[in-house]
Amino acid sequence: MDIGLSRRDFLAGTSAAAGFGGTPALAQARTALTVMAFPGHSNLSVFSAQHKGFFARRGLAVELKFTPNSGALREGLAKGEHHIAHAGVDNAVAMVEQAKADAVIVTGGDNGFNTIFVQPEIGSLAEIRGKTIAVDAPNTAYALLLYKVLKDAGLGRGDYQVRPVGGSPERLAALRQDKNLAAAVLFPPFSFQAQEAGLKDMGPAARVVGAYQAEGAFVMRDWAKANGEVLVRYIAALIEGRRWALDPANRSEATGLLAERLRLSPEIAAKTFAVISHPTAGMAKDAKFDLEGFRNVLKLRAEIEGQWGGIPPAPERYFDLSYYDRALANL
């Protein structure tokens, strides 16, 4: 596989998948939804729901677009350029607290499976002192995990430089192209591509916090109130997609789907699928929201960013699982 895969290639795969199922006349009758996410493992549920027609059978025509960075994802959601976002749910917290945009988390997803990678000559995290790290946005989600790991290794925020470069594929490309970039957090399949490229694995990023609610779906609260039934149907199809993908009977087909949509080699696709389908450490069953993991998201923001005076707020203000509960009850 070409590790320098362009976003155009990703978008070609997802655009082709968006029209799955039915005739043009039927497609016109469906409710159109635009979903934005980062390319990677966490999209398997959406891929599967498109591939097996779960969205179509619930009257939805879902277009999945990939974002280059969390700024574009958050700003587009706030402006109504897309209806649903899938990303690290700390982005929803950032929207509420920093942009004063009333986003709300509506599903869980997974713990991110994030790994810290460094240049091969770096022997320890302490050696990042005086160097530059690559992040998506400098004040949300997985960047905060990396800051926490470095803090526990004895490095303060003034001991290294931070360069925002974009999502996981952009961070991998940056590490490969610029040897002055010392470290980044990567998730599958890009973490496996990093290994192939000779970058050094320094272990899981979330080890410093324990349970961690990484990827999930979030929307604007007003949009959810106005389109509740549509959102319930979307979540139900999403859960169906996850159930199908994680069913051992569908392993070969699901792995092939992951390879096709993300333009992966069979080897990288198989490694990625093995991680996300692990019976105890893989993707959350039915995209269930991890409340303990989300509390740790807020604790991390309070500690690293000093937000809320260092005391995390009640988590309930950032999520509404009523749509998820209704969707689950309908299955």
Image (cartoon, rainbow, N blue to C red):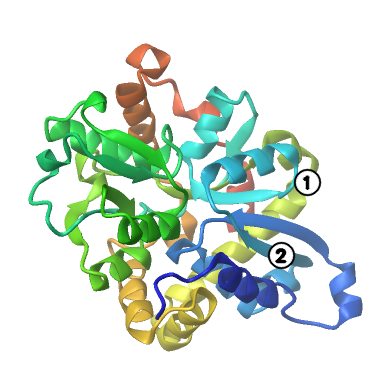
- Residue 16 visible in this rendered orientation of the protein: yes
Q: Could you tell me if the residues under marks 1 and 2 are in contact, i.e. CB atoms within 8 Å?
A: no
Q: CA distance from mark 1 to mark 2?
A: 15 Å
The spot of residue 139 in percent (x, y) is: 42, 32
From what the image shows, is residue 176 above or below residue 163?
below
Q: Residue furthest right?
A: 25
Q: Position of residue 84 (x, y in %)?
A: 65, 50
Horizontally, residue 314 falls left or right of residue 157, namely right
Q: What is the secondary structure assignment of the residue under circle 2?
A: strand
- What residue is shown at x 74% (from left), y 34% (from top)? 222
Read off the residue under disc 2. Answer: 62
Give how far across and how far down residue 89 sits, in percent. 48, 42
Displayed quadrant of residue 16:
bottom right
Near-viewer residue (83 or 155): 155
* Quadrant occupied by the C terminus: bottom right
Looking at numbered disc 1 in the image, what kind of residue is underneath it? Asn
Q: Which residue is mark 1?
A: 227
The residue shown at (50%, 49%) is 87
Q: Is residue 279 visible?
A: no
Residue located farthest toward the top when viewing the structure as drawn? 309
